[in-house]
Amino acid sequence: MTLRIYNTLSRQTEVFEPMEPGRVRMYVCGITVYDLCHIGHARSAVAFDVVLRWLQASGYDVTFVRNITDIEDKIIRRAQEQGISVRELTDRMIVEMYRDFDALGIARPTHDPRATDYVPQMLELIAALQQKGLAYQAENGDVNYAVRLFEDYGKLSGKTLDELRAGERVQVSDAKHDPLDFVLWKAAKSDEPEGARWDSPYGIGRPGWHIECSAMSAALLGNTFDIHGGGADLSFPHHENEIAQSEGANEQPLARLWMHNGFVNVDNEKMSKSLGNFFTIREVLQQFDAETIRFFIVRAHYRSPLNYSDAHLHDARAALKRLYTALDAVPPAPVTLDWTHPAAARFKAAMDEDFGTPEAVAVLFDLASAVNRHRSAEDAGLLRALGGCLGLLQGDPQAFLQAGSALSEDAIEAQIAERAAAKQARDFARADRIRDELRASGIVLKDTARGTSWEVAG
């Protein structure tokens, strides 16, 4: 079966044909590094890690670029709050980002460019836009993009300019010709620190967010490449603005195919910092092991909303335990993937239809059942090999099963202390919930006159 991918731009699933046979160039928008990564970041990074793995499993040589935004308003504010330089903050947060991503089994990209290393390329792109009449310098010193002069603006979101203006939050400024115009170069403010400003033909300032990705993708992948990806929240305005910048300057398509992963919801409401309902990867790793988190993300289709809850993560761990139990019962034989094998063929058909991970995971469970019935080392080997295409089942089965719980000892003791406080406050319902949550994580509590002890369930 031929790989088919849903293209946000055309709003249909298309047969994927790279520009160069056997080679794929892919750009995915990365993190703004001012704080620890949250589960929304994990969802996008894991989704495109699966895309990368499947493209490679399909025989493609992939050049994968995932940028790092290391200059932006939030970064400047956070550095000032902490009394450190922008570079010191971003260096530290990049280390923390990779600590989380590595734990989740997310492969390093071919290139992970920092925006601040590409300011000259951004200025060249701005100059090209100005020469074509698509950019203007405002009275406040900012250089803005004249959105209404780019005929195709709105083609990714599928909305007219008037609909976008009425329905989306845009930054309004008296210096703009139109409220939808966006900044390409920001004039420096008096209170902004060193390390957040560069000299330019337009005066001292720094790049706008959108121009960063246009410049980095062109520098590393060319003016047109195969796949551009990111979270659904980036479709407008970020990706729409990238198209306007890159295609306005180069007069050729930016990307042939656009992919967007779905939101993470908490209690069916979009997770966001403004609502206070977000969780960092680091926080979740205190309760659940990294492979369980990855499996929780992978078993949902990348374009679907992902509903986060402890209950869903407990269920994911229990499901993953079933797969590892099969591998523990029958040591896997080394296998070379044969896509004509019925199970492998079903797995491939699922993944070739817009990276259908729910159906692919179902194949893994069918294989696990077959392993348990027939005790076939070859089936166990196929289970492990197919799991590897999703970044799963590569660990030692006994180690996974014997861990029992993903909780650290400190986290367990903290929950026991919280339970004791709940009992002291006569909030027995809360105390019972904590006990049940620990039990679901494989931790059994024993209350005695001397206090509460715990052990890992066998």
Image (spheres, rainbow, N blue to C red):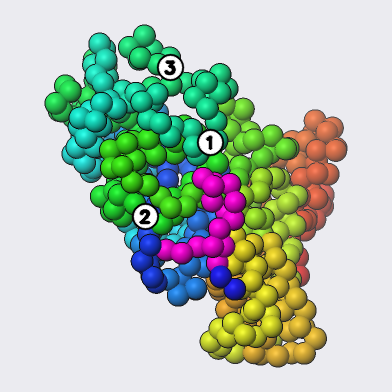
Mark 2, other Cα within 10 Å: few <14 / some 14–19 / many ≥20: many
> Residue at the location (58% across, 33% down)?
272
| Secondary element type, mark 3 | loop
The residue sitting at the front extreme is: 151
Q: Amino acid at mark 3?
A: Pro
| Secondary element type, mark 1 | loop
> Is the C-beta separation of discs 2 and 1 under 8 Å?
no
Residue 332 image offset from top left, x and y in percent? 62, 86
Q: Label 3, on which residue? A: 179
Question: How far apart are the two marked residues, 2 and 1, measured between alpha carbons?
Answer: 20 Å
Question: How far apart are the two marked residues, 2 and 3, measured between alpha carbons?
Answer: 30 Å
- Residue 260 visible? The answer is no
11 part of magenta stretch: yes
Magenta residues, as a range? 3-18
The one of 333 and 424 positioned closer to us in this rendering: 333
Q: Label 2, on which residue? A: 225
Q: Amino acid at mark 1?
A: Ser
Q: Label 1, on which residue? A: 157
> Residue at the location (42% across, 63% down)?
18
Q: Is residue 141 above or below residue 432?
A: above
> Residue at the location (43% across, 21% down)?
180
Is residue 402 toward the left or the right of residue 148 in the image?
A: right
Residue 416 image offset from top left, x and y in percent? 71, 46
- Residue 25 visible? The answer is yes
